[in-house]
Image (cartoon, helix red, strand yellow):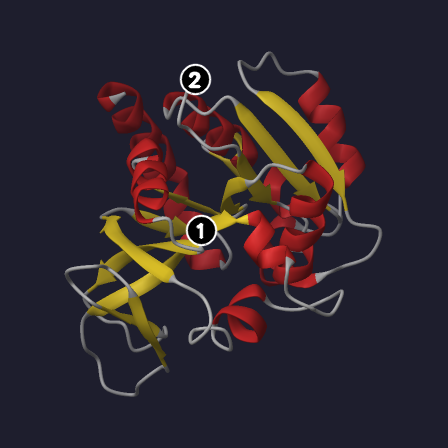
Amino acid sequence: MSSMLPCMILAGGLGTRLRPVLGEGLPKAMASVGGQPFLAWMLRWLEQQRVTDVVLSLGYGCGEIVDWLQRQSLELSVTIIEEDEPLGTGGAIMHALRSYGAPRMIVLNGDTITNLDLPAFAGFFNATSADLAIAATSVPDASRYGTLEFDTGSKRLIAFEEKRPVAAPGFINAGVYAVDAARLLGFDLPKRFSFEDDFLRRQIGSLDMRVFPDITEFIDIGIPSDYARAQQVVPLMCERSAHDS
């Protein structure tokens, strides 16, 4: 039996910051990158990583995304879980975990792609028996982000550091998580909340969270400047991933 965990993609966002580029109506997951929807690149990357089961958490633009999926020939099994109303990242994760029923899952933001080795990340998570693992990347200037402080031996998360005005290198959350569903669903949580701000930061003392600091390439298409850069960067990243797999 494969040790690879099912992967959830959070693709229900409005993509408000990309509206000047995308125009009204187009869901962010369908934003064109290198002539294909960004979601197509994500699914291709997951196939290259030997993922077999994908859960798409959808909200805004669900119908358009489902129509596109039905025209694709995929090697993945894709399950659609729809939000009836915006739930925030935390609410969307909990709704999908509850609906899908897998004991452990990997969660990915639907506007981010990295060179993370997903089987290695899943193996790390399974070996630690942690409640949650966070994939991280080192950036030369972490001032616009909050950073992660963790023990270099056990990789246990110690603190989420706030943004700092002084430019300095640091490890940042790359928006990829491995989660123990039963542990997370045991919390009494609101229907709508932010996974990082309203949950992770507040539960650092009660959850065993580990950091996997092995990402060296990372791009988030959430703002126009990064979306423009993604046009060349994302196809190259997927090409390298295919070569390495």
**In terms of image quadrants, where is residue 16?**
bottom right
Residue 95 location (% of width, % of height): 72, 51
Q: Is residue 239 above or below residue 212?
A: above
Q: Residues within 10 Å of mark 1 (few under 14, many from 20)?
A: many
Secondary structure of the residue carrying tag 1 is strand
Mark 1 or 2: the one toward you: 2
Residue 13 visible here = no
Q: Residue furthest right?
A: 84
> What residue does disc 1 label?
177
- Is residue 136 found left or right of 36 in the rendered image? left
Residue depicted at 23% across the width and 48% down the height:
214
Secondary structure of the residue carrying tag 2 is loop
Image mark for residue 19: none
The amino acid type, in three-letter code, at marker 2 is: Met
Residue depicted at 22% across the width and 69% down the height:
170
Measured Cα–Cα span from mark 1 to mark 2: 22 Å
Q: Quadrant of the C terminus?
A: top left
**In terms of image quadrants, where is residue 71?**
top right
Residue depicted at 66% across the width and 54% down the height:
94
Q: Is residue 39 above or below residue 244?
A: below
Residue 86 location (% of width, % of height): 76, 59
Residue 14 location (% of width, % of height): 69, 56
Which comes before the other along the chain, label 1 or label 2?
A: 2
> What residue does disc 2 label?
1
**In terms of image quadrants, where is residue 136?**
bottom left
Residue 103 location (% of width, % of height): 56, 40
Q: Quadrant of the N terminus?
A: top left
Residue 118 visible here = yes
- Is residue 155 found left or right of 103 in the rendered image? left
The amino acid type, in three-letter code, at marker 1 is: Tyr
